[in-house]
Image: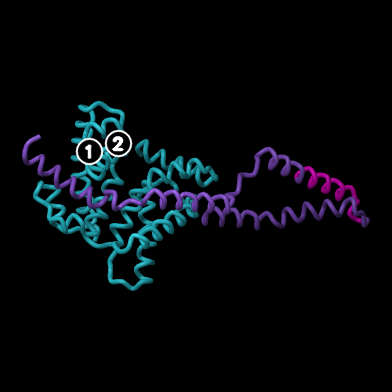
Chain colours: A purple, B cyan
Amino acid sequence: MGEPERDREETLASLIRAAAGPGARPDAEARERTLRMLDAEMRASRVPREFPDGILAAFVAFIAALAVWVGLRIGGGSALRPDPSLWMPACVVAANFFFLPVAILVIVLRRRHV
Amino acid sequence: MGPEAAGDRDLARRVAAGDRAALRDLYDRHADLLFAFISARMGGAREEVEEVWQETWLAALRAIGSYEGRSRFSTWLAAIARNKIADRIRRRERDADPFSVVPPEALAAVADGRPLPEEVAACDATRAHVIETLAALPEDYRAALVARYADGRGVEDVAAILGRTYKATESLLARAREAFRAAFVKGEGDRDGRA
């Protein structure tokens, strides 16, 4: 290494030493303490797990089947009678449809703000 | 995108999913440089630097789901740190500028190998720019430069740490120095151009 290159290396060394030397680093205790804090924060925030796809598909299939069944019953004229075996599932189906736009809105907002 | 950035993106995604081991890995990769960056940008007491460093990590953890990997993780982290530093400075109403400019003597010294006055090397803006430059380098370059010059280790030690031969380490250091010089001068030039 020639003299000019040695000078350049010394310049660079003094820059890096001043910026990233041991004095510009966290000590071991602070490092460990901060990591513990982050770990606790992560556990406290309980990052929501993804909803299992299988259960989600089964749930959707159940609601769809319920909707078809209610539709068939209404088509058969059962809605004209005050029959709890019809209007209770009908309420479940109606509530699902009612909350669909709300759920979509919540999902979109959460994705934007996570 | 290089393997290191892709690695950071993958780690960040795993952290967002609640993976604690990924959190430790990501933290180990960036903790020291982030601390040095905040220390350089803020100056002041070490306790205060530590507080801002912790606040930055906390904010990063809470927002990690929004990191999409479009920029380097270190750049994303530095942006959060800048906001935290600005908040802190505003709060204490100290007349300090977290976005100050690197002295031209530092740029000239790095470009031409001129001697560098100690006060220029130690000034906050220069130190911050050094950290930003290091953070932008490939990981093996950064590791070599930090071990050799920040820690003051001999080439043999650096070779042992990096698991390379002496000759390969010398060659790596030469390439790393060149990359550092280019990025240091170019980075500040870009900033001037944007201003």
Secondary structure under tag 2 reads: helix
In the foreground, B28 or A71 = B28
| Position of B21 relative to B123 (above/below) | above
Left or right of A88 in this view: B5: left
Secondary structure that dominates the magenta span: helix
Mark 1 and mark 2 lie on one chain; the one further toward the N terminus is 2
Q: Residue at x 28, y 71 (%)?
A: B95
What label does residue B176 carry, if any? 1
Q: Amino acid at mark 1?
A: Ala
Query: Within 10 Å of the Cα at label 2, are there few (<14), some (14-19), or many (20+) other Cα atoms?
Result: some
Q: Residue at x 58, y 53 (%)?
A: A44
> In the rendering, at what x and y percent does residue B67 appear?
45, 49
Kindly indicate whether the residue at mark 2 contacts the one at mark 1 (C-beta within 8 angstroms). Answer: yes
Left or right of A58 in this view: B116: left
Calculate the distance from the C-alpha at mark 1 to the C-alpha at mark 2. 8 Å
Q: Are marks 1 and 2 on the same chain?
A: yes
Q: Which residues are magenta?
A: A64-80
In the foreground, B76 or B139 = B139
Q: Amino acid at mark 2?
A: Asp
> In the rendering, at what x and y percent does residue B94 appear?
31, 71
User: As drawn, which residue projects farthest toward the bottom?
Assistant: B93
Q: Residue at x 16, y 57 (%)?
A: B120
Find disc 2 in the rendering and name its residue.
B140
Which chain is mark 2 on?
A: B
Q: Is residue A79 magenta?
A: yes
Secondary structure under tag 1 reads: helix
